[in-house]
Amino acid sequence: QLVESGGGSVQAGGSLKLSCVVSGVIRGSLCMAWFRQAPGKMREGVASIDSDGNTSYADSVKGRFTISQDNAKNTLYLQMTSLKPEDTAMYYCAADRTDWWLLPRYNYWGQGTQVTVSS
C-alpha cells in the first residue's frame, strides 16, 4: 500500500513537500517514483529513485524538485520548490522491484495527492 500526503494549494514560486508511506508486502528493495497527471493530459514521470539512491528527473522539474527516501520510515519524499502553475496536477507515488525509472509501468500506485499552483 502506498499513501501520499502533503499536497495543497500554493502560489507560484512557493514550495511543497510530498510524502508517500510504503507499507505491506511491497516493502523491500524498491525503485520508487513520483508521477503527475493534469486534467486531459497523460500521466508523466516526475522523478524516480532506485534502491541504490540513483535519481532521475523530468527536464521540466530539474533543479526545482528533489526526490529522496527514508528507508527507516519507509517513506518517499518529493520536495518541490519554485512551483509554477503548470505543475498543477494530481501527484502519484509508485513502486516496483523493477527499475522503471520514469516509465508508468510500476505495479504499485498510491491514490494521489492534489497540487494546485496559482499565478
Image (tube, rainbow, N blue to C red):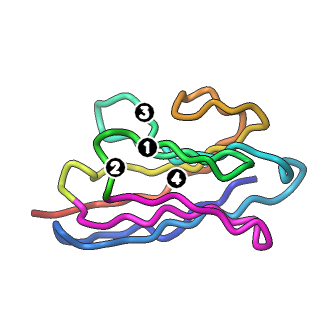
- The answer for how far apart the CA atoms under marks 3 and 4 are is 12 Å
Between marks 3 and 4 in the image, the one whose residue lies nearer the viewer:
3
Q: Which residue is mark 3?
A: 43
Residue at the spot 18% in from the left edge and 71% down from the top edge: 11
Q: Earlier in the sequence, mark 1 or mark 4?
A: 1
**Badges 1 and 2: C-beta atoms under 8 Å apart?**
yes
Residue 29 numbered mark, or none: none
Mark nearest the camera among 1 and 3 is: 1
Amino acid on which the number 4 mark rests in the picture: Gly
Task: State the image coordinates of residue 75 (x, y, percent, origin top left).
Answer: 68, 66
Q: Which residues are magenta?
A: 64-83
Q: Residue at x 71, y 40 (%)?
A: 108
Q: Crowdedness of circle 1 by 10 Å Cα count: few (<14), some, many (20+)?
A: many
User: In the displayed structure, does residue 9 sit left or right of residue 75?
Assistant: left
What residue sits right under mark 2 in the picture? Answer: 62
Q: How many marks?
A: 4
Q: Earlier in the sequence, mark 1 or mark 3?
A: 3
x, y percent for residue 56: 50, 42
Q: Nearer the viewer, mark 4 or mark 2?
A: 2
Q: Amino acid at mark 2?
A: Lys
Check residue 57 in the rendering and tell me which mark sits there, or answer none.
Answer: 1
